């Protein structure tokens, strides 16, 4: 009969196993969810492209429109990230969430520099 290994050795081995082996993160996003992400992304990009034109109008920016665009950019980013969070193993979905969040932050920053809605 062998002696049981010391508790410290078991804890160390358990820690090595937990750090070195990644558990499966689940399935990738479904086709329907990808279609939603792509649709949200397309709309988000169009709004993001319109925002500088709205802010850079000669004279005063159209703050009502700029605020509307920034809010909707962030709402779309939130929707993209909600889907991505349901699929933590889907790298592409996570990357698209990060991109959408960055667009939201930039939109808020740009609008808050010129308008008072943010």
Image (spheres, helix red, strand yellow):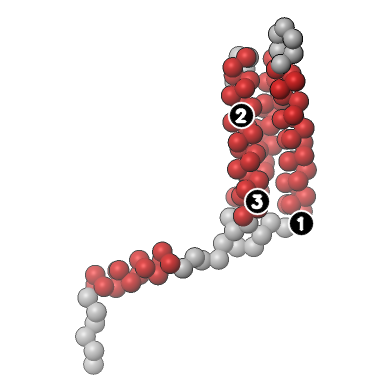
Mark toward the start of the polypeptide (3 vs 2): 3
- What residue is at 24 percent from the left and 70 percent from the top? 8
- Residue 106 percent across, percent down from the top left: 61, 29
Q: Which quarter of the picture shows residue 58? A: top right
Q: Which corner quadrant of the image does residue 79 belong to?
A: top right
- Quadrant housing the C terminus: top right
Q: Please report the residue visible at 68 percent of the width from the left and 32 percent of the height from the top.
A: 73
User: Dot 2 corresponds to which residue?
Assistant: 106
Q: Secondary structure at mark 1?
A: helix
Height in image: 79 above or below 9?
Answer: above
Question: Circle 2 — which element?
Answer: helix
Q: Which mark is residue 44?
A: none
- Disc 3 is placed on an element classified as helix
Q: CA distance from mark 3 to mark 2?
A: 20 Å
Q: Residue 93 bears which disc, if any?
A: 3
**In this view of the protein, which residue sits in the foreground, 12 or 32?**
12
């Amino acid at each position: 009969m062998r002696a049981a290994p010391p508790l410290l050795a078991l804890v160390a081995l358990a820690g090595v196993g937990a750090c070195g082996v990644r558990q499966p993160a689940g399935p990738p996003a479904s086709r329907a969810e990808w279609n939603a992400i792509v649709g949200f992304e397309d709309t988000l990009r169009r709004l993001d492209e319109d925002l500088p034109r709205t802010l850079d109008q000669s004279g005063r920016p159209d703050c009502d429109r700029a605020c509307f665009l920034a809010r909707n950019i962030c709402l779309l980013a939130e929707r993209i990230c909600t889907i991505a969070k349901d699929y933590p193993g889907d790298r592409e979905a996570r990357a698209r969430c990060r991109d959408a969040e960055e667009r939201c932050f930039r939109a808020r920053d740009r609008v808050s520099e010129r308008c008072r809605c943010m």
